[in-house]
Image: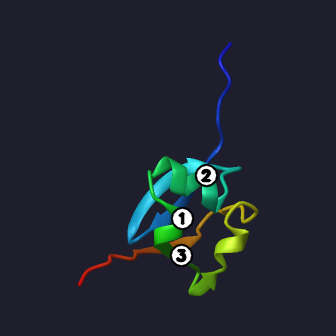
Amino acid sequence: MSATIDLIPCTVNGETLDIPATLTLAGLLTQLDLDPRKIAIERNREIVPRSTYATVTLCPGDALEIVHFIGGG
């Protein structure tokens, strides 16, 4: 018997994704191969402090906007 993973719908930058129900923002960034030092996250129209990425668990229907910082000169 294989284990099933409960998935929840979330919107990330306008795209609906089904993600594991226990996933944190830090876990999502790992799945998306994003460096948390180079991004900012807005969850349901509120900026999420970087220091809380590992403890913020995503909920069904969350709307996330992930912005990448790009250096240049």
Can you tell which mark lies on residue 27? 2
Furthest toward the front, the residue is: 73
Name the outermost residue toward the top: 1
Query: Looking at the rendering, in which quadrant would you find the N terminus?
Result: top right
- Per the image, label 3 sits on a secondary structure element best described as strand
Q: Secondary structure at mark 1?
A: helix
Could you tell which of marks 2 and 3 lies nearer the N-terminus?
2
Farthest residue, direction left = 73
Marks 1 and 2, the one that precedes in the sequence: 2
Q: In the image, residue 24 lies at what x, y percent? A: 67, 57
State the residue position of label 3: 41
Looking at the rendered structure, the number of numbered marks drawn on it comes to: 3
Q: CA distance from mark 1 to mark 3?
A: 9 Å
> What's the CA distance linking mark 2 and mark 3?
13 Å
Please tell me in which quadrant of the rendered image residue 2 appears: top right
Instruction: Label 2, secondary structure: give it.
Output: helix
Q: Residue at x 32, y 78 (%)?
A: 71
Image colouring:
rainbow
As rendered, which of 59 and 70 lies closer to the eye? 70
Looking at the rendered structure, the kind of residue marked 3 is Ile
How busy is the neighbourhood of tag 2: few (under 14 within 10 Å), some, or many (20 plus)? Answer: some
Q: Name the amino acid type tagged 1.
A: Pro
Q: Position of residue 22 (x, y in %)?
A: 71, 50
Q: In 3D space, how far apart are the residues under numbered discs 1 and 2 (Cα atoms)?
A: 10 Å
Q: Amino acid at mark 2?
A: Gly
Q: Which residue is mark 1?
A: 36
Q: Give the percent coordinates (x, y) of residue 62.
A: 59, 70
| Above or below 32: residue 40 | below
Q: Is residue 54 left or right of residue 67?
A: right
Q: Residue shown at 66%/79% (left/top)?
A: 49
N-terminal label among 1 and 3: 1
In the displayed structure, would residue 34 be above or below residue 53? above
